[in-house]
Amino acid sequence: RMTIVRRHGPGGARRALVKGAPEELLPRCTALLGPNGALPMGDDDRRRILDRSGAMARDALRVLAAAYRDLGTGEALDAERLEQDLVFVGLAGMYDPPRPEARDAVARCRAAGIRVVMITGDHPRTAAAIARELGLAGAGDDVVTGPEIDALGDAEFVRRVPAIAVYARVTAEHKLRIVRAWKAHGRTVAMTGDGVNDAPAIKGADIGVAMGLTGTEVTKEASDMVITDDNFASIVAAVEEGRGIYANIRKTLQYLLAGNTGELMLMLGAVALGLPVPLAAIQLLWINLVTDGLPALCLAVDPVDPAVMKAAPRGRAERLADRAFLSRMLLTGALTAGAAFVAYVASLRIWNDLAMARAHAFSTLVFAELLRSFGCRSDSVPLWRRGVPANRRLVGVVAAGVFIQIASPHIKWLGSFLDTPPMPLAHCIALLALSLVPAAVLELLKVVRPWRRGIAQAASEGGSHHE
């Protein structure tokens, strides 16, 4: 609540004008303003006014009560005294509609496994109505007020916090306690706000987000990032962009490390079997700097896959190079090295020409790396479902790489530079077909894995039901 004192009437008498939450003001009112002046207020009047206030709150209105008191001559301006024996004037309902994009942003958060809760100083019924309008609160979600939080012990509050969607009539202390309760569950917590009373919770969260337009300087200083347009949808867009960047870093590293693993396996395998080294130094440099480097740069700026906002958030302990990452890297390296090794050994036996065998292994490795780059855009979605044209840079780099590799045996200076002797075009086509095998196997695994998981899950559920 708040009070101001103003001169009133021709005599300059002073009047205290008070506004605040209805449940705060009504106990301080002893009269009710009627058509002919102030009338005594009874308990029935208070109940009727509170019922009306509740009905307005259920319609998502923010409700303020207004009251006044005329001050006597020479009466001291004591804050507590001014707000007693008030005359109730009426209720004002204000509707602050959510932005049109807010509901969609909340739905995207829910799909992404991000739990959004509302923390407000509004009446609990108002907060609940707005939460339902935004899709924040469901049938099983609770609405809790600040006094109710005070009545809960720390352990009990931590236990209940996952089921609470809306907090109403809260203070700065309550906000910080909510943040700490969520962190006690091991969650990564982001807190948004614009007022001074939001600053402690913003500072205590893992990610503090301040509003750039309406936010106070204290809140901005306490935050980790500032949203310049004060739009919740911008936070969701930032989450999507961050997930996209992480996915691109992961796919780029996967592509580069798997390629290097394949080269290493090819070289070590040949040496272990007593065969000549299958790649010349210039060929290894070409693969690492050009064949692998340029597609990797394209993967690093791959357009964000909309599916990133349908995946669950990463756990705090999750590593970039986890078990799945390493196993996929080794499998990809083995498949690539295997295709190049087959071309190398077959060429040695058929033509008995080391330079030609190296050229065949080199071309197979280059083709396999370039074609595999398309599949690296997703770990789970097959290439034929995701499509290629979304990353035109990658398409151009792969097309240019394949063209240069096919042209190198037929252009004297290029073949001399890459240490590739002349070979028939049929050889290039056959090697290109062989290099498709690793990419095809990896794409088929993307189809088989979900199918096998589905069968295992169905068998598990069936066994549990039988028990």
Image (cartoon, helix red, strand yellow):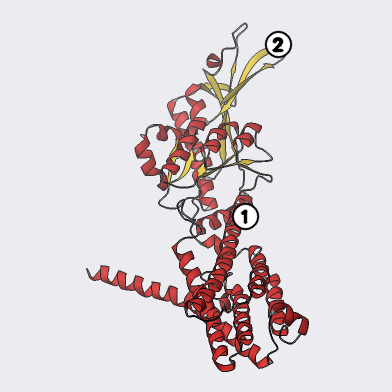
Q: Residues within 10 Å of mark 1 (few under 14, many from 20)?
A: some
Residue at which label 1 appears: 237
Q: Earlier in the sequence, mark 2 or mark 1?
A: 2
Q: Position of residue 460 (x, y in %)?
A: 30, 70
In the image: residue 182, left or right of residue 109: left
Image position, residue 411 (x, y; %): 76, 85
From the image, tell me which residue sits under label 2.
Answer: 11
Q: Would you say residue 35 is visible in this rendering?
A: yes
Position of the N terminus, as image quadrant, is top right
Quadrant where the C terminus is found in the figure: bottom left
In the image as oriented, which residue stretches furthest toward the left? 467
Alpha carbon of mark 2 to alpha carbon of mark 1: how far? 59 Å
Compare residues 60 and 367 and report the one nearer the observer.
Answer: 367
Number of labelled discs? 2
Kind of residue indicated by mark 1: Ala
30 w.r.t. 451: above or below: above
Residue 285 position in % (x across, y down): 66, 70
Q: Residue at x 43, y 46 (%)?
A: 186
- Residue 92: give x, y in percent of width and height: 59, 35
Residue at 51% in and 77% down: 271
Name the element at disc 1.
helix
Taking 411 as reference, is 122 above or below it? Answer: above
- Of badges 2 and 1, the one in the foreground is 1
Vertical placement of 182 versus 365: above or below? above
Q: Nearer the viewer, residue 368 or 337?
A: 337
Residue at 56%, 84% (x, y): give it: 344
Q: Amino acid at mark 2?
A: Gly
- Classify mark 2: residues with Cα within 10 Å, few (<14), some (14-19) or many (20+): few
